[in-house]
Image (cartoon, grey):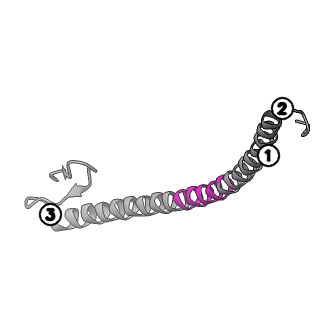
Amino acid sequence: MTVDNKTPHQQYPLPHPTNQLDQDVLRLAEALKAVDSNVYALLQADKSANEARETLKKALEENDKTLDAKLTTLEDKHETQVEASTKQARKHKLNQLLGESIFPL
């Protein structure tokens, strides 16, 4: 009778000293096929994870470019607003100093 030892996690067949060699050879062949299948599945999962990571990396790089462009636009708008506000404040100050409304606001 064959002793049916298995690995604790993946339940791969293990040889046993009391088993006949012809029985254990078949069991070991079965175990190697299962290991090969599991390694292949892990490699495929790694490949998928790497592809997903690259896709995410590209998306983040694009997002950075978009945010940089928006920041530049906002900085330009802010600068324009500051210039307009400064000009308006100068006109207001001159009008106050002269006591007149020479410079239309």
Q: Which mark is residue 99?
A: 2
Q: Magenta stretch?
A: 52-67
| Separation of marks 3 and 2 at Cα, in angstroms | 115 Å
Percent across and percent down for residue 24 are 20, 63
Tags 1 and 3 in contact by the CB under 8 Å rule? no
Tell us which disc is closer to us: 1 or 2: 2
Mark earlier in primary sequence (1, 2): 1
Query: Pointer 3: residues within 10 angstroms few (<14), some, or many (20+)?
Result: few
Foreground label between 3 and 2? 2
Disc 3 residue type (three-letter): Gln
Our reading of the magenta stretch's main secondary structure is helix
Q: Are marks 3 and 2 in contact (CB under 8 Å)?
A: no
Reply above or below: 2 against 26: above
Q: Secondary structure at mark 1?
A: helix
In the picture, which quadrant includes the C terminus? top right
Residue 57 in the image: state x and y as whole percent: 56, 59
Marks 1 and 2, Cα distance to the nearest angstrom?
18 Å
Q: CA distance from mark 1 to mark 3?
A: 99 Å
Toward the front, the furthest residue is 98
Q: Amino acid at mark 2?
A: Gly
* Residue at the image point whose x is 78% and y is 37% from the top: 97
**Horizontal placement of 42 versus 100: left or right?**
left
| Mark 1 surroundings within 10 Å by alpha-carbon count, few (fewer than 14), some (14 through 19), many (20 or more) | few
Q: Name the amino acid type tagged 1.
A: Lys
Above/below status of 70 relative to 92: below
- Checking the image for residue 20, the label placed there is 3
